[in-house]
Image (cartoon, grey):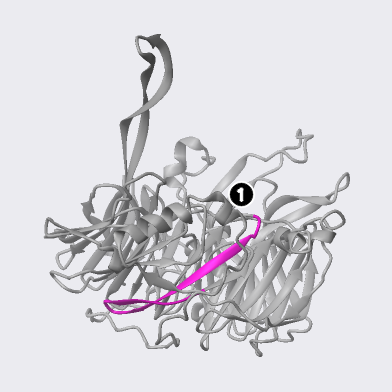
Amino acid sequence: MRPLSLGTAVSVLSLIALTMVPVTMYLTHSPATPTVHSLTPFSSYEELQQFIFTKSCNGLEVRGLYNPNPAPQPLSGNELSATAASSSSYSGSIPTHSETNAQVAGVDELDTVKNDGTYLYTVTNNTVAIVLAYPVVDAKQVARISVNGSIQGIFIDGSRLVVITQHFQYYPVPYYTTGGPAVAGGVSTIAVPAHSYDQTSSVWIFDVSNHSNPVLTTTVISNGTLSGARLIGDYVYMVSTQPIGCSEPVPLPENILDGHALTIMPGQIYHSDIADYAQSFTTVIAVDVSQINPAPAAKTFLIGTSSNIYVSLNQIYLTQPIWSQTEQTTIHRISINGSSINYEATGTVPGHVLNQFSMDEYNGYFRIATSEYGYARVLAFQTAVSTVSPQQQTDLYVLDSGLRTIGSLERLSPGEAFYTSRFMGDRAYLVTYQRMDPLFVISLQDPSQPKVLGQLNITGVSDYLQPYDETHLIGLGKSSTNVTWENAALFQGLKLSFFDVSDPNHPVDTSNFLVGDRGSDSPALTDHRAVLFDESLNLLVIPVEIAQAQQSSTYPWAYNPPVWQGAYVFNVTGQNGLVFRGGVTHLPTGELPSYYNTNLFVDRALYIGGVLYTVSNSMVKMNSLADLTEIGSVSLA
């Protein structure tokens, strides 16, 4: 075991959900002189401290910010590459099995359940259970792992199990203020108890060569909140954020290696020229998990509060929402290649990002969809302030390798909420919603001239788009009914749609599956990792909770009680669309879902060979993929 601790960086901000009217207006343009930004290292501690107090601690500086003056040119070597991820060091004959439903091929995402074709690893009650899953006749739990902190997810890389945790330490801190009773010489000072939180993010690496006896080999600890983690080849990349306050002295981040504290000097900290209301030390850590005693690499950046991240095979894109009247998002591109971590470029776009699927990298271009109210655009035209009211809108931008905007498509469905997007090759698919669900098909074939090819208006909304193949999409969302007394709609039960976009000018909804009444829900609507999809098997599985309307109910906006929870299994083909095959539940026969049995709620599904595995907090159940008959279970209680 080799303990290592790294001081770092970045408080995670959650993003926005925005709203927009069913009017369709498009504006396309390419800025003639894009603003150039960069990250540069500090020359001294004094410069670092002055930067913080004149930028993030200066409200006037931030409030007036809009496309700040150009900074020095980005560092050299900022061309995007497409090097394939290195293969895992583990090899062996294992049955065909599913993997986590990830956004980018070759970039594994943190999840609560993993499998390697023989063993299943699942987070349950803040421990990791290791289950011999295949063959089914030998299925059993073989080990349980506990670590310090709240487990955020796991990776499996051959004989290495990686556990990512967060830890929040709550402790009292004296805070002094004036205002006590008068004493000789003046007013007394009263000590009022306050509290502080120490936040750390950690990487725990276990050798599971002997699955019944996992051995902890490496621990990496980073001060700050977890922004995200990915596994590419044998390397785990973790991004964390540590906020910086406006009081002196400004503490420098520290890395602790083998018990020795290593202070990150100002010349090793890169800072942005983009002002924001808050600054954070954001640290990117790379660890080769295949090594017995890895030497983690790290880079620290002083930027505004980091939010959603997008990770490709060779790049990490950090997004930084600017919380002022300008409604901007700053994007920082960090290249990664094994233990090499380098800053490459910085750019800004109007609006804020919804989630990781609002971003994509393709053929050397970065594409991003944002939402904004348009305050900055109104303020830019002072004469129009009294006559123009800001309105929510969805925008799409294309940036080059230096993160300079080269193409844009703006004002999609003003007044409607931006719900989801998906980039697939040289196309993008966007969903906005108020009373209808416009699915936009957008061409990105010419990066400088994005354009809408087609639009499909249907009832309900898709919260998540799952690619089926190059010409079909699966939409997961809710059905809806119009509210007669206002320009709105009420969500009802679950709705799955099968979109045919083979003719991009005329997208078609070829198949729908509707189930449940208002109150029905699925984790898959907000967490793509809850989706099990395999085109080769025509297989789609999602966890669902089905609510049923009561005849006595007279309130259309009320949520109905749940009557079933489990996994729904579908057969999906281009010819027949979505065909429901059946459901698998962990609840005893006749037992309704309730607060008291949530430990049996299915939240993940996977397959190994011809077996479907559904996972809840207390059980792994095995069913035949062919006919869904139950063939076994393993208790995790």
Q: Position of residue 178 (x, y in %)?
A: 42, 22
Q: Is disc 1 surrounded by few (<14), some (14 to 19) or many (20+) residues within 10 Å? A: many
Q: Is residue 500 above or below residue 484?
A: below
Answer left or right for 192 relative to 515: left
**Front residue of 128 and 301:** 301
- Which residue is located at x 67 percent, y 77 percent? 576
- Left-right relation of 80 to 571: left
Seen in the picture, residue 52 relative to 511 is either above or below; the reply is: above
User: Dot 1 corresponds to which residue?
Assistant: 546
Q: Which residues are magenta?
A: 325-346
Q: Amino acid at mark 1?
A: Ile
- Residue 416 drawn in magenta: no
The answer to which quarter of the image holds residue 426 is: bottom right
Residue 113 visible in image: yes
**Quadrant position of the C terminus in the picture:** top left
> Is most of the magenta stretch helix, strand or loop?
strand
Residue at position x 84%, y 60% in the image? 384
Q: Is residue 310 left or right of residue 163?
A: right
Q: Residue at x 33, y 69 (%)?
A: 237
> In the rendered image of this protein, does residue 490 appear above or below residue 530?
above
- Whether the magenta-drawn stretch holds residue 339 is answered as yes
Q: Quadrant of residue 248?
A: top left
Q: Position of residue 262 (x, y in %)?
A: 18, 60
Secondary structure of the residue carrying numbered label 1? strand
Point out residue 189 in the picture as x, y percentages from the top left corner: 37, 20
Image quarter (top left, top right, bottom left or bottom right) of the N terminus: bottom left
Percent x, y of residue 291: 16, 73
